[in-house]
Amino acid sequence: MGDVVNLNKFRKARDRRTAESLAAENRVRFGQAKDLKAKLRTEAEQTQKDLDGKRVD
């Protein structure tokens, strides 16, 4: 026979993992300084413009 699994512990462990991944994502998204965010945004816009200019229709 298989091992007995406590479903409450399983559910809570799963919820902890998803909460931790969400927290890590939020740390990356919201944990940057304002000037760094602006710099990254302008770099992304410039990269997008470069790609749009090289696009072949």
Image (cartoon, rainbow, N blue to C red):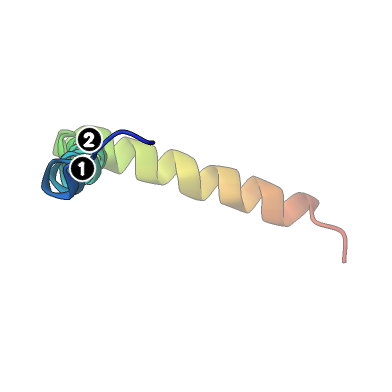
Among the 4 quarters of the image, the one containing residue 32: top left
Q: Nearer the viewer, residue 49 or 25?
A: 25
Q: Say what secondary structure mark 2 lies in.
A: helix
48 versus 20 height, above or below: below
- The amino acid type, in three-letter code, at marker 1 is Phe
Residue receiving disc 2: 24
Q: Nearer the viewer, residue 42 or 15?
A: 15
Q: Nearer the viewer, residue 8 or 27?
A: 8
Task: Name the residue located 26 percent from the left edge and 39 percent from the top edge.
Answer: 21
16 left or right of 55 in image: left
Rendered image: mark on residue 10: 1
51 left or right of 38 in image: right
- The amino acid type, in three-letter code, at marker 2 is Ala
Separation (CA) of disc 2 from disc 1: 21 Å
- Percent from the top left, x then y, of residue 25? 26, 41
Task: Name the residue located 23 percent from the left edge and 44 percent from the top edge.
Answer: 14
For disc 2, the neighbor class at 10 Å (few under 14, some 14 to 19, many from 20) is: few
| Quadrant the N terminus occupies | top left
Q: Nearer the viewer, residue 50 or 10?
A: 10
* Front disc: 2 or 1: 1
Q: Say what secondary structure mark 1 lies in.
A: helix
> Across the whole image, how many numbered discs are drawn on residues?
2
- Percent from the top left, x then y, of residue 34? 16, 39
| Quadrant the C terminus occupies | bottom right
Task: Name the residue located 80 percent from the left edge and 56 percent from the top edge.
Answer: 55
Task: Name the residue located 20 percent from the left edge and 42 percent from the top edge.
Answer: 10
- Percent from the top left, x then y, of residue 2? 37, 36
**Residue lying farthest front?**
1
- Percent from the top left, x then y, of residue 36? 25, 32
